[in-house]
Image (tube, grey):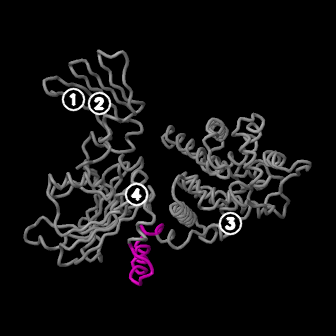
Amino acid sequence: MNGEQFCEFVKLAKLGDEQSLERLSALVRPRLCSYVYRVTLNRDIIDDLAQETLLEMVKSLHHLRDNDRFWPWLYRIALSKIQQHFAAQKRQPAVPSSTIADDFFTNQSPPSEDDSLRILMRQELSHKMLSAIGQLRPKHRAVLSLRCFEQMPYTEIALALECNELNARIAFFRAKQALKKLLVHRGLDKGTLLMCLGLFGQLTAPSDAALNLFEQLTAPAGTEAGPIAPGSGASATGAGAIPPGPGSGLPVASAITKVGMIAGLIGAAGSKLGMAVIALLAGLGAVSTLTLLSAGLPDRENVTAIYYIEQSKSNDPAIASLSKGAYEQWYYFPEGIDGPMFKRMQRWDSKQQQKLCAWLENGTGNYYYDSGKKEILLTNHHLFRSNLRVRRLPTDRSAFIDFLNQVEGPVPGIEHRRDAGTGLLIERFDDRFVDARHFRTNYVYNTLEEEVFHFENWISGVPIRDERDEMHRRGWTFFRIEGRLGNRNVHGQGRLPFFYHAGRDHPPWLTIAVDDGIRIMDTSQGAVIIRSDASRPVAYPAGSFFKGFSRPWT
């Protein structure tokens, strides 16, 4: 069945032909199950998630506008179901990767004596490779599957991931780089990437029975399909075409892993080398810095991470004209830009030659590295500025910045440049310091992973001194509310986690009562307002009434 025939087949199903719809569901299921397996690495949930995806496909098929975009549309639904599953399970770990390899090798024919050593080595490689892939974010596994095994062009990957083509290329670049790093940590060379991806495709391919069914369903009328041999060389010509046995362990060609210069530079922009290359190209006139940095900008609501370096001003009047130092900063938002925030900061001297103190605020606590005493302090509170000004983020809206400037006053000597389309800050020019003249800050988005904020990836071999009180060591507390709102009495109680991971086992909740008959309750399961004069409660999304609790607005 070629792409044109498949589009016609989808068209019949859209028109309500029940036989075509049933046949379509059976036809796509092997590829769908394989995709779900590669993203979740959990065999136990494949059937449930695939079934949920197929039910959504049947229910929403009439909304599909372009029949030749069926596959990216279906994979977008599947990824949404997978993300909902992970959210509901609070990131429950996947089935150990060793199980995948063990299942595969158990089902193989008994090896000959000559093949035993080769298979043993392959098993060891498989375990290391699967251990590395298991550490990737699900979105990274998704984009690797779509590009390497489904052989999708970046235009269709963008549809599946709900982003533009450049961001799809960047996502693939970051997934590939993250996997290379994880492979190296397990003693494998970066050059084994393609081999490991090919092996991963074979270990997670649909079963032979499913592939045979797939071939029978897609065979032209009047022909008889035979079994499909892995590595048969079949390939798709587009999302509409259906290769016999897609993703069945075919070798991954190096050409398919290319992302292009711009995407590669933006993907590497979080590193000093990446920023240096961008600056060099801009200086040579090859391309403007602004073009490079703004080309891959996500929409504000899709920002997951930020990286930049700024100079800071000392509060000592005697040295007010000098820079206090260059502050390299990393931010990560595990639940979106308006939710909880992880932070990492490294202070340098103004010329960025010598590292000084450092801070880390992640899902487990607040850490401060004292470079003078060579020790790490575990503290109760988030980092606050010595001048007590509210910290501005590059994602803050202009109206919010204007409000803060009205309250605290603007900072002279700084010029900002924002992207007109997204409102995100792109560049900042700072002329306040005699020892760091015309200092330029470039803001780079979505180049970081949560692993950057893990304590073990921060500073090692340094003693830790715990300065937290008993309540902060526990990680959460109860609180009471007593007060007045106008002429009405208000009272309530709730629970507040102090850091992100504590909120998993002890999520925040809140209940407030007003003496005129209004009661507000908010938990991780949902929120509601109950009025004594109303017939039924009014429901709101969970977290509506303690949305700011998770963000340190210090």
Secondary structure predominantly adopted by residues drawn in magenta: helix
Q: CA distance from mark 3 to mark 1?
A: 60 Å
Which residue in the structure is indicated by mark 3? 195
Residue 44 shown left or right of residue 455 in the figure: right
Asked which quadrant contains residue 517, the reply is top left
Q: Which mark is residue 494?
A: 2
Q: Is residue 353 above or below residue 358?
A: below
Span highlighted in magenta in the image: 266-289
Earlier sequence position, callout 2 versus callout 4: 4
- Residue shown at 52% from the left, 40% from the top: 84
Q: Is residue 121 visible?
A: yes
Name the residue nearer the viewer: 283 or 274.
Answer: 283
Amino acid carrying label 1: it is: Ile
Q: Secondary structure at mark 2?
A: strand
Which residue in the structure is indicated by mark 4? 305
Q: CA distance from mark 1 to mark 4?
A: 34 Å
Name the residue nearer the viewer: 428 or 201.
Answer: 428
